[in-house]
Amino acid sequence: MILDFGTARMRATTVAIADPGPLERFLPESGPGSAFIRRGDGVVALGEVARFETDRLDAADVWWDEISNQIDHDSELPGEFGTGPLALGSFIFDPDRSMERSVLTVPQVIIGRRGDLAWMTRLGDARRGTALPSPGEPTRRPGHITQMGGSLRRGEWERIVAEVVTLIRSGEVDKVVLARDLHLKADGPLDLRHIYGRLLETYPMTWAYLIDGLVGATPELLLRRQGGLVTSRVLAGTVWQDGSGAVDPLALAAELARSEKDMSEHAFAVRSVADALAPYCRAMNVPDSPSVLRLPNVMHLATDVTGVVEPGATSLALAAALHPSAAVCGTPTHLAMDIIAEVETIDRGRYAGPVGWVDMDGDGEWAIALRGGQVRPESPESIQLFAGAGIVADSTPSVEVQETAAKFVPMLQALGVAPS
């Protein structure tokens, strides 16, 4: 589905503003509103002047190029990264097997901040001036929430993990990322702004996203294209704390860095990203060994792959080339994708797909939609959470299900539900 402003040209104005305070406070309780924020920096988008629903990232890239060429932009901040008209979107994990659609929208108003710089971009009616929109209504905490369980029982999911381990050990595939879900239902419509605010407060180091009913806080940046440079943060290999505080975090980090299973899983993911970016880059830097990224409830092996981008490769085009990486799918990609479709039993929808924004120059930030959940318009009181784990030859089913349980924690905390 395409909704846009046809062939008519549209004017956009970007102005510098005083610090607006927490960006998320401008999100409306009802009506279109999106956000992509990390450590207080990012954008909140209000209203919608154009919308594109699709199956493919490359189709969205073509659409945004056509739309952005119809916008005349006046800016007080020319050349500043992320300012001006944007398209924000989230994309389904597997376009060949999902009943859902990817979405890319062009907002009417954007309020942004990066470091000491704050701005507002408005598309359309210039008579509205430079006054900031009023903050949204106070957020509502969820009422009583019932955990409805997942599409599969824990034992059933462990059995599937064991089957996939057998396939890997037989040499059919090197790695497969398997996901499971958890359904929760409140006694009234969920206010996603409240969930989003809790995620921002508890997990400031992540990229928190809220787009078209999809909400979460992901530690994994699929890519940032800024000028002629691209960066992709690869996370694969995980260890988690049990909440008792009995284990020294430094000891856990050392355990992760020594784990052959986790190092192997991470190497697959790094190689898949480097191979996907190589055709679009003049030069690349791939570190020889990962670092350890510590989050409040888990630690990950992390590698930042960087490259000098060839002209014309937009952030959406790069996202199309990178997705799905081994970190969320497996290796080899086509075999892992087939296995996921055969055994996983759930429609991931936009979970584990790219989520973020692109500007008129093709720069942008796209994360991977992890540590999140989906609320659908037909059931605003219900949310489906997702979590996954990378399965390799040394994987143990009971340990993998514990890893997914640890990855459910951020969303359960945000909902005010005690992890089980």
Image (tube, grey):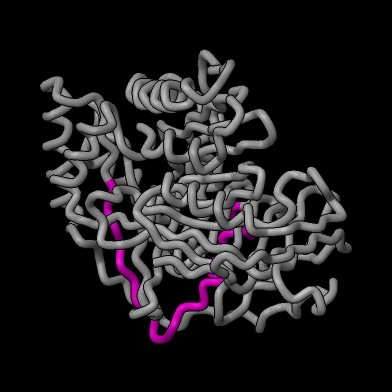
Residue at the far top in the pictured view? 288
Residue 58 x, y percent position in the rendering: 43, 44
Find out whether residue 10 is within the magenta segment.
Answer: no
Please tell me which residue is depicted at 28% across the width and 31% down the height of the picture.
333
Query: Where on the picture, by quarter, is residue 258?
Result: top left
Q: Is residue 14 left or right of residue 179?
A: right
Nearest the viewer among 264 and 42 is 42
The quarter in which the C terminus is drawn is bottom left
The answer to whether one can see residue 255 in this image is no
Please tell me which residue is depicted at 67% across the width and 67% down the height of the picture.
24
Residue 23 x, y percent position in the rendering: 71, 64
Find out whether residue 202 is within the magenta segment.
Answer: yes
Residue 44 x, y percent position in the rendering: 66, 63
Q: Is residue 320 left or right of residue 19?
A: left
Query: Where on the picture, by quarter, is residue 98?
Result: bottom left
Nearest the viewer among 123 and 207 is 123
Please tell me which residue is depicted at 24% across the width and 24% down the height of the picture.
174
Asked if residue 48 is positioned above or below residue 18 in the image, the reply reads below
Please tell me which residue is depicted at 36% across the width and 39% down the height of the picture.
328
The answer to whether one can see residue 71 in this image is yes
Asked if residue 87 is positioned above or below residue 7 in the image, the reply reads above
Nearest the viewer among 133 and 387 is 133
Query: Where on the picture, by quarter, is residue 186?
Result: bottom left
Q: Is residue 168 left or right of residue 135?
A: left
Magenta residues?
179-203
Residue at the far front in the pictured view? 7
Asked if residue 372 is positioned above or below residue 80 in the image, the reply reads below
The quarter in which the N terminus is drawn is bottom left
